[in-house]
Image (cartoon, grey):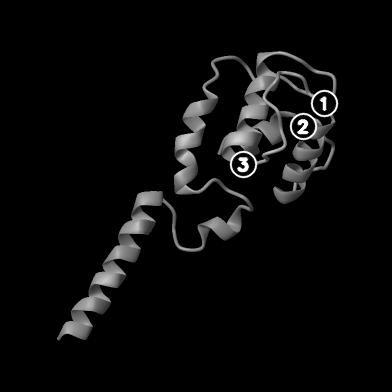
Amino acid sequence: MRIRSASWAAAAAALLAVAATGAAPGAAAARPHAPSVTAAAEWRLCLYLGGHPTLQKGSTGEAVRHLQCILSEVYRYLNVSVNGVFEEVTEASVRHLQQQFSLPVTGIVDAATWQALHP
């Protein structure tokens, strides 16, 4: 009986974990580099109330700072500085993320890239 109850407890724990994420088993495989449940806390660090304009190398401002925060805190691109200036490191990180999400690899943050960044 103990073996069955241990197996049942393990199965129940797995189901609870899936229910807590709101996803079906294997859903993470459908979206490369999707934020994990633990990444939810990092989103709070990137609070931003502005719009999501098209950004590219040379862009500056709060929207760029928001992008850099997402890249750094949520997607863990640790070399991205949150300084509000869209420079080469930010562009390279955007290109890599676009490749991971099967988007056109342009280095430009357009509507499709913003949508991928904000699941």
| Mark 3 Cα-neighbour bin, 10 Å: few <14, some 14–19, many ≥20 | many
Q: CA distance from mark 1 to mark 3?
A: 18 Å
- Label 2: which secondary element: helix
Residues at marks 1 and 3 touching, judged by CB atoms closer than 8 Å:
no
| Mark 2 Cα-neighbour bin, 10 Å: few <14, some 14–19, many ≥20 | many
Q: Residue at x 80, y 34 (%)?
A: 89
- Which residue does the numbered mark 1 point to in the structure image? 87
Q: Earlier in the sequence, mark 1 or mark 3?
A: 3
Q: What's under tag 2, amino acid-wise?
A: Thr
Residue 29: x and y in percent read 58, 60
Residue 38: x and y in percent read 45, 45
- Which residue does the numbered mark 3 point to in the structure image? 75
| Mark 1 Cα-neighbour bin, 10 Å: few <14, some 14–19, many ≥20 | some
The number of discs equals: 3
- For residue 90, the mark is 2
Q: Quadrant of residue 49?
A: top right
Q: Quadrant of the N terminus?
A: bottom left
Q: Quadrant of residue 92?
A: top right
